Image (cartoon, rainbow, N blue to C red):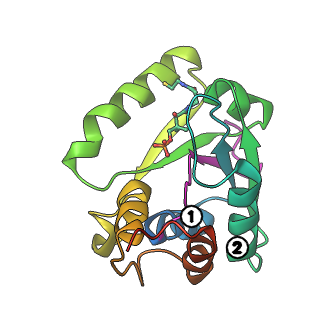
Amino acid sequence: MESNRSRLAVYPGSFDPLTNGHVDIIERGARLFDRIVIAILVNLDKQPLFSPEERKDILREVFRSKPNVEIETFNGLLVDYAEDRKADVIVRGLRAISDFEYEMQMALMNRRLNREIETVFMMPDERYTYLSSRLAKEVFALGGSISGLVPELVESRLRSKNIQHN
Ligand code: PNS
C-alpha cells in the first residue's frame, strides 16, 4: 500500500434495509479513510425486500451531504470487486462475539483470495449491538416501533411497502 495516495475502503453488505448500525459504521469509516464505497451485494439467490436500486437510492439520499461516501452495487467475489476499485481495505462492523466467527471466516477467506486487501473491523455504538436488518424488518412487519433504529427514510419506504401484518 503506497503511503502518499488516498486510502479507499469498501463497506460491503446486503443493506436490506439500511439500519442506523450501518449508518454508524459508515460515518466512522468516512472519518478514518479518505473515501468509502458502500458496496451493495446483488444476490440473485435471495429474495430481498428492497431491490438493489431501491437500496442504492436510500443510501444515496441518506449520505447525500457526505462527498467521500460513494454508493455502488456489486456481484461476484468481494475481493475481485475491491481489487477492481483499487481499494485498500474492506470494512465490516462487529456487533458482538456472535458475529466474530462468521466474520473471521470471511476475512481469512478473503485474505487467502487476495493478500493485498486488509479487513478492518469497527464496532458500532452500543445502542445498535442487537440491531440487524432482519430484526428491523420483522419488528416493523409485526407492528413494533423501529424508530431510532433505521433512518426515517427507511421507515417511510417500509410503510409504503405495506408489509405490516396487524
Ligand atoms: O450484510 P451481509 O449479508 O452480512 O454481507 C455479506 C457480504 C456481502 C459481505 C458477503 O456475503 C460477501 O462478501 N459476498 C460476496 C461473495 C463473496 O465474496 N463470497 C466469499 C466471501 S469469503
Is residue 11 something that shows in the picture? yes
Frontmost residue, 42 versus 13: 42
The mark nearer the N terminus, 1 or 2, is 1
Q: Quadrant of the N terminus?
A: top right
Q: Which residues are magenta?
A: 1-19
> Residue 76, percent across and down?
68, 24
Main SS, magenta residues: loop
- Is residue 67 depicted above or below 36 in this figure? below
Image quadrant where residue 47 sits: top right
Residue at image point 28% right, 64% down: 129
Left or right: residue 135 versus residue 81 is left
Q: Which residue is mark 2?
A: 63
For this orientation, the residue located farthest to the top is: 112
Residue appearing at x 70%, y 31% in the figure:
75
Q: Which corner quadrant of the image does residue 86 belong to? A: top right
Residue receiving disc 1: 26
Residue 75 against residue 40 in the figure, above or below: above
